Structure formats: C-alpha cells, structure tokens
Amino acid sequence: MVKNIINVRKLSKVFDNSLRAVDGITFDVRQGEIFGFLGPNGAGKTTTIKMLTTLISPTSGDAKIFDFSINKSASAVRASVGVVPQEFTADEDLTAYDNMLLMADLYGVSRTIAKTRIVELLSLVELSNAAKRKVNTYSGGMRRRLELAIGLVNHPKVLFLDEPTLGLDVQTRAAVWTYIEKLKKEYKMTIFMTTHYLDEADSLCDRVAIIDHGKIIKIDTPKNLKDSLGGDIIELKIENERTNVSDLLKKITGVKNVKKNGVEYRLKVKSAETLAPKLITMLTSKGHKVTKLSLSKPTLDEVYLEYTGRSLREEQSNSLDIMSMRRTQRLSRS
Ligand SMILES: Nc1ncnc2c1ncn2[C@@H]1O[C@H](COP(=O)(O)OP(=O)(O)OP(=O)(O)O)[C@@H](O)[C@H]1O
Ligand SMILES: [Mg+2]
C-alpha cells in the first residue's frame, strides 16, 4: 500500500500582508518517491520548502511530515528532514570536514557518530580527497556536492533539495543525479526537489507538481503529464511544394492539428508511429514528394508550456545570469 509521508493541507504564505507567495496548496508526497516541484521564478517553490522544513511559519494551513505538524511539532519535523537550500550555506573559511562537523553539532548528532558519518558522506559525494581543504578553494560543482553531503548529516528520512543542479555543467549534473537516485534506492529516502531542468524532472522524478503563482496547477507522473497533451508531433517537408497541403493533412484520421511554419508542416497526431507511413502513402499518391519527416513525443517542456503559458528554457538562462551576476558581485567585494 502506498504510504504518504508528507501531507500538505491548504498551506499558504503571505508576505507583507499582500503577496500570496504560496496560495492554499494541498498535496501528498509518497514514501520513497522522488517528488519534483516545477515552476517559474517566483512561483513559490522555495517558500514551500522553507515552510515544510520549518525555517519560516505558514500564514495559514498546515503540513505533516511523519504525522508531525510543522505548526505544532517543529523540532520533531526538523529532526527527521534534511535540506539542501538553493543558496550555498557552507562556511568558505572552513574545511568541508569542519563544515560538516558544525552541522552535525547543530543537529545534535553525537561526535562519535558524526565522525564516521562524515567520512561516509564525503566519500558518497566523492569529496574525500578534498575533505581537509577550505571551501573557498572548491569549484561550483564541488560546493553543490558538499551542500548535498551537509543536508544528509542527520540521516534524514526525507530530503528537500532546492535546485540541486542549478548552474552546474552537464557532467556534474549527471553526477548529482546519480547521488539522488542512490539515496532513493539504497537509503529508501523520500526526496522532494525543485528544478528548472525539465529533462532532469522527467528522468528522475516519480511524480511532479507544476506550481505557478503559488498554486498547484497539475500533479502527476511525467508520463501521464506528457500523455495528457494527447498526442505526438510529426514535422514534414514537401519537395518543390506548389500547393498548400494543410487541408489534405487535416482530413486524415488521427491528425488533430496542422500548423505551417515557413516551409515545414507541424502536425499534432494521435500516434506518430502508425500515422507516418499512411501520411507518406497518401501524399505520394497525390503527387507530392516528402523530403523530411520527423516524429517526436511531447516532452515535459511542452507540458510546462501548455499549463503555464511560458517556457522554462528562458527562465533557466535568466537564473544562470543572476547566479553569475551574484558571483561577480561577491568576487568584487572580496
Ligand atoms: N522574505 C520574503 N519577503 C517578501 N517576499 C518574499 C520573501 N521570500 C520570497 N518572497 C516572494 O515570494 C514569491 C515566491 O518566492 P520563492 O522564492 O518561493 O519563489 P521560487 O519559486 O523559489 O522562485 P525561484 O525559481 O526564483 O527560486 C516571490 O515573489 C518572492 O519575491
Ligand atoms: Mg527558489
């Protein structure tokens, strides 16, 4: 039987008496799943994580983690969750090892246990060799991995990851994915993560919620969300086209929608594999020669666009700009 480990009920956060950053969200997270929280900048993702990890208190509503209410049993919640925040938190002037020791102390983990655990965790994120180096000598990828290790120091049952791979290169992102999957498989951890990378959400998450303007728009498995768009996409081109074939294409059973972008046709169809051969036969019989034909399944990008009216790709580059701007400011201060 599926057991829910996080129950969120009508949770809201209003800032400055007017900004409804999180607006009455209700959902459950199942034991052992990787649950993805997707949404544009300012959608309310970080605010939700901060409430669920008791860093800030809700304006109204409640959430339970292992039956502990975030309103009534904040310290019990804190003891059972780990959090890897969006911003780096490690102390630059300390070594990775000392940063972890400090965090273990904060969580009340005994020194004896902490020492073994830290060695284990630093090895998990492949930082053993750099354990005694100060964090200010670390690369961005090393910092992210250290943050992940820090978030695990109290051996949490539930881990919150806020943009764990933002700004990382492709290789390091893939490495972080591997750790996240390992935590799920080997430690049976429940993972709640936000991300701007839809390919990441698609391959890692068991279920995703799309949030916008503080409200949950959709929750489902990536597969169901993609299927909900109701079809595949076929793109085709015709050699030396003399007449527009849109009307011809629209008449074929299974074709839902035809758009022409320049010389290319873009069709939304029920099933691309079954329809493609029929399309070619029909067009050839009418004297048209197909010079390009490509089939694609909808991606989470398209799902996201459908439900929020925006593309996350632009957002992603904005966030990266902001990150690099912050880094420049930090460097110019020091
Ligand atoms: N302490 C605060 N005081 C006032 N407004 C806040 C505060 N924290 C967040 N907000 C506002 O609440 C809204 C939601 O912010 P939040 O950080 O939760 O968004 P997010 O979904 O995490 O965005 P991003 O993708 O950029 O990380 C934003 O409009 C933000 O400006
Ligand atoms: Mg955020």
Image: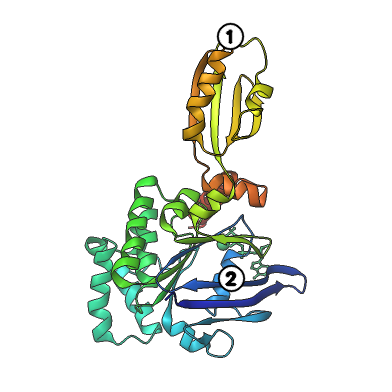
Mark 2 Cβ inside 8 Å of ligand 1: yes
Residue in the foreground of this view, choosing between 29 and 252: 252
Task: Say above or below: 96 vs 51.
Answer: above
Amino acid at circle 1: Asn
Point 27% across, 67% down: residue = 122
Query: Which corner quadrant of the image does residue 158 belong to?
Result: bottom left
Q: Is residue 253 visible?
A: yes
Residue in the foreground of this view, choosing between 208 and 332: 208
Point 42% across, 50% down: residue = 168
Amino acid at circle 2: Thr
For this orientation, the residue located farthest to the bottom is: 72
* Secondary element type, mark 1: loop
Residue position marked by numbered label 1 in the rendering: 240
Residue 29, image x, y percentages? 50, 72
Q: Tell whether 308 sits left or right of 74.
A: right
Residue in the foreground of this view, choosing between 211 and 258: 258
Residue 316, image x, y percentages? 55, 48
* Secondary element type, mark 2: helix
Query: Which corner quadrant of the image does residue 265 belong to?
Result: top right
Q: Residues under labels 2 and 1: Cα distance?
A: 55 Å
Residue position marked by numbered label 2 in the rendering: 48
Point 54% across, 82% down: residue = 64
Task: Say above or below: 247 vs 233.
Answer: above
Residue 112, image x, y percentages? 24, 85
Q: Residues within 10 Å of mark 2 (few under 14, many from 20)?
A: many
